[in-house]
Image (cartoon, grey):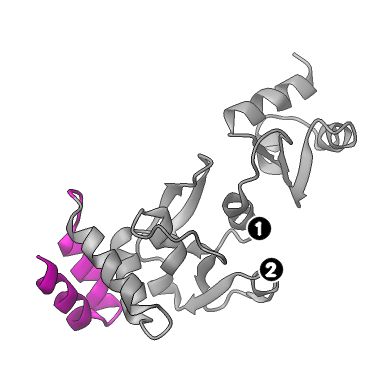
Amino acid sequence: MSKQNKIVELIKKNNGIITGKQLKENNIEREYLSIMNKESKIERVSRGVYIDPNVFEDNMFNTQYKFKRGVFSHLTALYLHGLSNRTPLKYTMTFPRSYNTTNAKKIGVNVYRVVENKYNLGIEKCKTNNGNYVSVYSVERTLCDITRYNSRVDKEIITSAYKLYSKRKKKDLSKLYFYAKKLKVYSKVKSYIEVLL
């Protein structure tokens, strides 16, 4: 199998996307990406990320690839977890406090920065609508975040998210309360839950 055919196979397996990192893992030189891009077989969407031009571009995955330390959070995480039907106009990501977020802000990402021990709480992987995995805060961490920053989030969105969470079969109240204590929103979270359960 030629290296270009191997790239095509990798793109098919990867929901229409290939990255420079994946090429390296498969011992394929990056120059093949440039050749295929010039021949319009693939399309460059950002540094080190190429897509099949016949497949819908996954902006969420591309944003995650550009900002590897960013974790989708707040309203974007609500959407990913099915706790909001509002497609985010801008993505919201949380970064460690020491991370330089200038480039993320330049492309329109809503940025939150937190200390390292709070940054690491509740990170998990979640599929985008295009089937690619991105880093996102867990449902329980997300509920705590929107409660914590309630002045920046519409009250109706917060209430709706808690209502949808209360109806879920897979809810982990002990994890929710654990994060609520760590993020200093325990009494607010508890009051939302007590009303709904």
Q: Residue at x 44, y 61 (%)?
A: 86
Circle nearer the N terminus (2, 1): 1
Report the amino acid beneath label 1. Answer: Lys
- Residue 119's place in the image compared with 62, above or below, is below
Per the model, the C-alpha gap separating discs 2 and 1 is 11 Å
Q: Does residue 113 appear to the left or right of 187 in the view shown?
A: right
Can the viewer see residue 73 in this picture? no
Q: Position of residue 90 (x, y in %)?
A: 57, 67
Q: Which residue is mark 2?
A: 107
Residue farthest to the top, as pictured: 1
Residue 173 lies, with reference to residue 168, above or below; the image says below
Q: Position of residue 33 (x, y in %)?
A: 81, 36
Question: Along the horizontal axis of the image, is 14 left or right of 192?
Answer: right
Q: Secondary structure at mark 1?
A: helix
CA neighbours of label 2 inside 10 A, class few (<14), some (14 to 19), many (20+): few
| Residue 48, percent from left and from top | 74, 47
Left or right of 35 on screen, residue 185: left
Segment tinted magenta in the rendering: 169-197
- Tell us which disc is closer to us: 2 or 1: 2
**Residue in the foreground of this view, choosing between 63 and 96:** 63
- Which amino acid, mark 2? Ile
Which corner quadrant holds the N terminus?
top right
Name the dominant secondary structure of the magenta segment. helix
The residue at which mark 1 appears reads as 66
Q: Is residue 188 visible?
A: yes
